[in-house]
Amino acid sequence: MKPTEVVVVGQGYVGLPLSIAIAEAGFKVIGFDLNGALVEKLNSGISHIEDIPIETLVKSLKSGNYTATSNPSDFGNSEIAIIAVPTPLNDERKPDISFIEAASKLLGENLLKSALIINESTSYPGTLRDVIAPIVNEYSPQSAKHSFAISPERVDPGNSNWKIKNTPRILAGLTLEAREKAREFYSSFCDDLVEVSSPEVAEAAKLFENTFRQVNIALVNEFAQITNSLGIPVREVLDAASTKPYGFMKFTPGVGVGGHCIPVDPSYLAYVAEKNGVVPSFINLANNVNLAMPEYIVSRIENLLGGQLSEKKILICGMAYKKDVADVRESPSEGLIDLLRIRGSKVLWHDPLVGKWRGEVSSEIGKEFDLIVIAIAHSTLDVEALNALSTVIFDTTFSLQTAIQL
């Protein structure tokens, strides 16, 4: 028999799609978020995430299986509670798990009975056992006997092929009973469950998945700099290398890395490594290479403009961190714009999906610019308009054949 109520704490890029998937499986879902304005929009049928169309949200609302709230007392009777909150980096680029800690305290204070508490937020090994469970238990009534499990989120915004249902999901529990409860729950809306021996294995696996990507992106970004110095087109080299049917996986260079995973997760792994006496040299190097890519792009732009950046009018196409999403979290375009403005350039940006950023609005593509940079090439990017310009175009995405390539 399905639980009558599930609360998902956090209604962002992870929490909202998860909430809707659970609701569509027949559960009663309460989407909790401290952002009252967001909650009001959700209950009005307004989705802030591209992967959740308005009609999908409205359907779940009308069925009565989903509702959003900012009132903790609304989820007191939940039998399953899922933590899906951000795990960013602080100003020193160290893990900030304050949202996880706050969510754990919130659940302990407001759950009225024993519940299965699941963490989907990404964090370092030991977070479920040493942080979440102790905090929840500390603030819970003595009569509550909660069980704890983990299933790290695997969400790729804008990916039409891999969704919550068909993406393999790792899960583990602090106890065998917790893992079995989690398996029963997730099997109702996920096709492929991968059970592992401990929460620490699940936590480490999630971090390594994105550290793998960070390291390989750093490698190809460095390789692009090497091939440029040699006068060799990196795109052709990568295409040639990718014809090998084994032992090679193609990554492509760009302005840097962005989003909620790749720029962040490796730092969580590096943190726990250093805490346990291991120097994460490879991870730190990859982080530094990718963080430095905007500076390299600026140097290429300066060279294309004859060594002069001051007063040059530059348009950056693509503010989002990846193609066909409106998400600007950790977007490398932000750093690129900041660096160019520091050097005196007059920088505007074009991204209809983002629309607004830092109080600025998306500009139109035009011929009044000294140089245009393609940082992210959305499917809606007007390639014909770009081709019609006589302006110098620097393409970091390999999208415009006639442009100067990274």
Image (cartoon, rainbow, N blue to C red):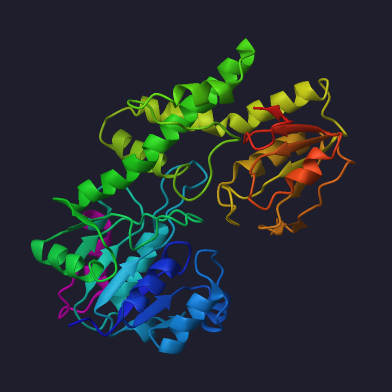
Q: Is residue 130 magenta?
A: yes
Q: Quadrant of the N terminus?
A: bottom left
Q: Tag count in the figure?
A: 0
> Which residue is found at the position 65% from the left and 42% from the top?
333
User: Residue 347's image quarter?
Assistant: top right
Q: Is residue 10 visible?
A: no
Q: Is residue 358 visible?
A: yes
Left or right placement of residue 309 versus residue 107 in this view: right
Q: Tell which residue pokes out farthest to the left in this image.
A: 176
49 relative to 226, above or below = below
Q: Quadrant of the C terminus?
A: top right
Q: Tell which residue pokes out farthest to the top in this image.
A: 230
Q: Is residue 13 magenta?
A: no
Percent x, y for residue 328? 60, 52
User: Residue 17's image quarter?
Assistant: bottom left
45 relative to 266, above or below = below
> Which residue is found at the position 38% from the left and 68% from the top?
18
Residue nearest the viewer, comparing 20 with 246:
246
Left or right placement of residue 163 versus residue 177 in this view: right
Left or right placement of residue 385 versus residue 132 in this view: right
The stretch in magenta equals 129-147
> Which residue is found at the position 39% from the left and 42% from the top?
210
Percent x, y for residue 68? 46, 80
Residue nearest the viewer, comparing 61 with 31:
61
